[in-house]
Image: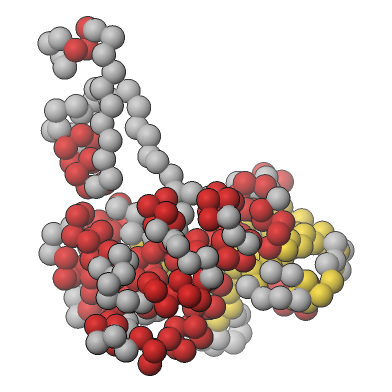
């Protein structure tokens, strides 16, 4: 490149889907092209709107398929059954393309895969704090950080801290498909292997709604980032003052620091939600946060499949209510 090609009009374009390989052999210090690249372009997944358009399905189904397949074009291309429940039955089959996909994804990127599998399984089953992951895997807390850092760099997991309180950080599986794979395919693998999916499908249908609800929160957070003017968007959790170990959680908290504006939000994967009831709960939980408490301007935002009645104001605070269809407008 230095001796000849750089002096011509040649454009060298390198593409690859194995992230660790691209970083090590192309981008990292010591690689032949280190310091010579003109542009890094990370190909993003489909947005929720693009998932709906690609599959030609309803808003609700688009969220469900996004929750499981994470906007990956290859995965969406394999969707033949547009009924989500029938799709679940087909995916929970040892002959399905997706049955070993989680394992293959990790094998491409990682060595010592058994340790990483164990860590991801721990997180998928709700062990999100360092101490919980350590107890589940049997790995000392101080030795687990390098594994978590690798998984985070690859985009498999995400370290999440509350807007106020860095010490309460947790780890979540960022990749929707991997999260689904560990929560449902790996969890019920022994049944799937002997073609006994009929014995667990009821449990899957009961658990999947909660799973989709959590991914719906991600969709709502993205909507706030794109459609509201705030500096920081995240969520908040912690102990309720004066209530011992009792905790609270707010799905969305956003700040406009220089204007002392704060937005509190709730996301409900339900029909006919009461906006007034949720605003009352938000008002209570927002009182636990001391950030410019007497000076700040507060706003509420509520997301749901649908509302029994939308409201625009609650106790002097501006309220934004968004139904599922609004997220696709």
Residue 36 in view (yes/no): yes
The answer to whether 30 appears left or right of 314 in the picture is: left
Closer-to-camera residue (59/145): 59
Farthest bottom residue? 199
Q: Residue sitting at 50 percent across and 76 percent down?
A: 85
Residue 288 in view (yes/no): no
Percent from the top left, x then y, of residue 69?
43, 61
Where, by quadrant of the figure, is residue 247 drawn?
bottom right
Q: How is the image coloured?
A: secondary structure
Closer-to-camera residue (328/2): 328
Q: Residue sitting at 76 percent across and 62 percent down?
A: 321
Q: Residue sitting at 28 percent across and 9 percent down?
A: 9
Percent from the top left, x then y, of residue 132?
32, 79
Q: Residue sitting at 32 percent across and 23 percent down?
A: 38
Percent from the top left, x then y, of residue 182?
33, 74
Farthest front residue? 80
The correct choice, above or below, for 190 with respect to 80 in the image is below
The N terminus, quarter of image: top left
The correct choice, above or below, for 45 with respect to 31 in the image is below
The answer to whether 194 appears left or right of 304 in the picture is: left
Percent from the top left, x then y, of residue 146?
22, 60
The answer to whether 206 appears left or right of 155 in the picture is: right
Q: How many marks?
A: 0
């Amino acid at each position: 490149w230095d001796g000849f090609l750089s002096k011509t009009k040649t454009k060298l374009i390198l593409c690859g889907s194995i992230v660790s390989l691209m970083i090590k052999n192309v981008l990292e210090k010591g690689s032949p092209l280190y310091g010579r690249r003109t542009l890094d372009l990370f190909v993003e997944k489909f947005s929720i709107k693009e998932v709906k358009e690609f599959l030609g399905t309803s808003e609700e189904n688009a969220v469900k398929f996004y929750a499981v397949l994470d906007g990956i074009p290859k995965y969406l291309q394999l969707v033949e059954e547009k009924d989500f429940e029938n799709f679940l039955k087909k995916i929970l089959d040892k002959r399905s393309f997706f049955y070993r996909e989680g394992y293959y994804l990790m094998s491409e990127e990682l060595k010592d895969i058994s340790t990483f599998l164990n860590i991801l399984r721990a997180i998928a089953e709700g062990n999100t704090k360092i101490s919980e992951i350590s107890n589940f895997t049997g790995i000392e807390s101080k030795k687990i950080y390098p594994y978590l850092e690798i998984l985070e760099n690859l985009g498999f997991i995400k370290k999440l801290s509350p807007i106020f309180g860095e010490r309460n950080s947790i780890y979540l599986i960022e990749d929707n498909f991997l999260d689904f794979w560990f929560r449902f395919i790996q969890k019920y693998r022994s049944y799937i292997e002997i073609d006994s999916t009929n014995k667990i499908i009821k449990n899957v249908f009961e658990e999947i709604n909660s799973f989709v609800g959590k991914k719906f929160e991600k969709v709502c957070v993205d909507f706030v980032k794109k459609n509201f003017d705030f500096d920081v968007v995240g969520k908040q959790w912690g102990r309720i003052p004066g209530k011992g170990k009792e905790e609270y959680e707010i799905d969305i908290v956003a700040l406009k620091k220089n204007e002392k504006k704060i937005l509190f939000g709730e996301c409900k994967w339900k029909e006919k939600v009461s906006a007034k009831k949720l605003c009352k709960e938000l008002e209570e939980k927002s009182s636990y946060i001391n950030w410019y408490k007497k000076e700040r301007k507060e706003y509420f935002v509520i997301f749901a499949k649908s509302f029994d009645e939308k409201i625009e104001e609650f106790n002097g605070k501006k309220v934004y209510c968004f139904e599922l269809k609004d997220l696709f407008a």
